[in-house]
């Protein structure tokens, strides 16, 4: 007997149909004055029935318990996300003593500025060279509702997304660009992390490269390449300066009519001057007492 094939949902689990869409909004909160009045009422509810209406003691105790559940104390740099029977009812950002709706459960969420350093990642740059790179990310919770309900663990989420963004940005640049354009690259890393972290209600304050080096297997060869490139650049500068000096010397000799140089003598002088000016070692002069010919 053939069984019917199970139906497959057109929209997989985890897409827009199940994504948590929630935004922070303020909860009802009363200040210290209301909290003091509430405390007086609680004391009255517990004391008055003992002397006047003992039969109302239990109902008054229940009311007092409800009023006691409204007290909250919060220190600076923290917020409290309030839920009533599992439903998000708002965020309390008032520091010190305050009152919230009764029977609310609260979750403390820090809004202090925090930072962490990513693991040292091995990534290929735009030229395909393996690099070891790491970054420091400075962040802060901006939307407490998203940070509490949109992701499972906000710190773990930020860490993984920061490493992913760092990998993506690194592959678009060469080692030289990464090392010479730190501010520009740091801004791009911060923007990339911010775009990925928006889901968790997190604001990225700053991101900067903390570690940058060639991978050990190519570090020595890349160092030799850099040294060779530096030598070539230095040689180009030396030759350019030597040519300028030789040209200036010949022009002054002609203008002051010190010596009359035919093309062969002129070529010989140019050759000698370039050898002296471009040589790595000190040259030893040779005195020619006879004729050039």
Image (tube, helix red, strand yellow):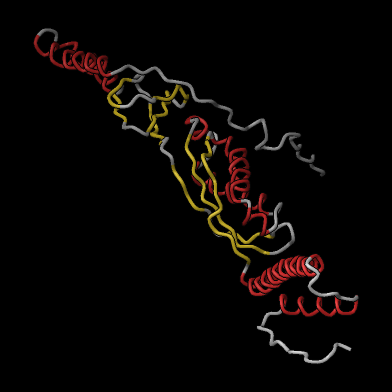
Seen in the picture, residue 50 relative to 156 is either above or below; the reply is above
Residue closest to the eye, 49 or 30: 30
Q: Quadrant of residue 33?
A: top left
Tell me which residue sits at (45%, 21%) in the image: 89
* Residue 62 pos. (x, y %): 26, 18
| Image quarter in which the C terminus is found | bottom right
Which residue is situated farthest in the left direction here? Answer: 51
287 lies above or below 153: below
The extreme front residue here reads: 257
Residue drawn where x is 35% and y is 22% of the image: 103
Pinpoint residue 38: horizontal percent, then vertical percent.
Answer: 24, 15
Q: Residue at x 32, y 27 (%)?
A: 95
> Residue 58 appears at what percent x and percent y?
21, 16
Across and down, in percent, residue 106 comes to 38, 29
Is residue 48 found left or right of 286 in the rendered image? left
Q: Looking at the figure, which quarter contains the N terminus?
A: top right
The answer to whether residue 59 is left or right of residue 260 is left
Give the quarter of the image for residue 243.
Answer: bottom right
165 shown above or below 84: below
Total marks drawn? Answer: 0
Hey, which residue is sitting farthest top in the picture? 52
Residue at 63%, 55% (x, y): give it: 180
């Amino acid at each position: 007997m053939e069984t019917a094939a199970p139906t497959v949902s057109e929209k997989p689990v985890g897409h827009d149909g199940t994504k948590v869409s929630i935004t922070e909004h303020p909860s009802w909160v009363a200040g210290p004055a209301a909290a003091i009045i509430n405390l007086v009422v609680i004391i009255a509810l517990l004391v008055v029935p003992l002397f006047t209406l003992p039969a109302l003691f239990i109902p008054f105790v229940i009311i007092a318990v409800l009023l006691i559940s409204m007290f909250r104390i919060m220190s600076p740099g923290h917020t409290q996300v309030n839920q009533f029977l599992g439903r998000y009812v708002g965020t309390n950002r008032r520091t010190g003593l305050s009152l919230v709706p009764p029977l609310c459960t609260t979750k403390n969420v820090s809004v202090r500025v925090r930072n962490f350093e990513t693991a040292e990642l091995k990534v290929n740059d735009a030229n395909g060279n393996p690099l070891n790179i790491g970054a420091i990310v400075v962040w802060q919770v901006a939307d407490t509702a998203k940070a509490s309900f949109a992701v499972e663990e906000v710190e773990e989420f930020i860490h993984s997304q920061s490493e992913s963004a760092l990998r993506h940005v690194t592959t678009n640049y060469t080692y030289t660009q990464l090392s010479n354009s730190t501010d520009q690259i740091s801004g791009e890393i911060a923007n990339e992390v911010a775009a990925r972290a928006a889901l968790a209600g997190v604001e990225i304050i700053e991101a900067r490269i903390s570690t940058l080096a060639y991978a050990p297997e190519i570090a020595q060869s890349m160092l030799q390449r850099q040294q060779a490139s530096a030598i070539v650049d230095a040689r180009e500068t030396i030759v350019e300066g030597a040519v300028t000096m030789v040209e200036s010397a010949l022009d002054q000799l002609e203008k002051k009519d010190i010596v009359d140089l035919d093309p062969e003598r002129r070529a010989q002088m140019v050759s000698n001057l370039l050898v002296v000016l471009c040589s790595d070692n000190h040259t030893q002069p040779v005195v020619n007492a006879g004729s050039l010919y």
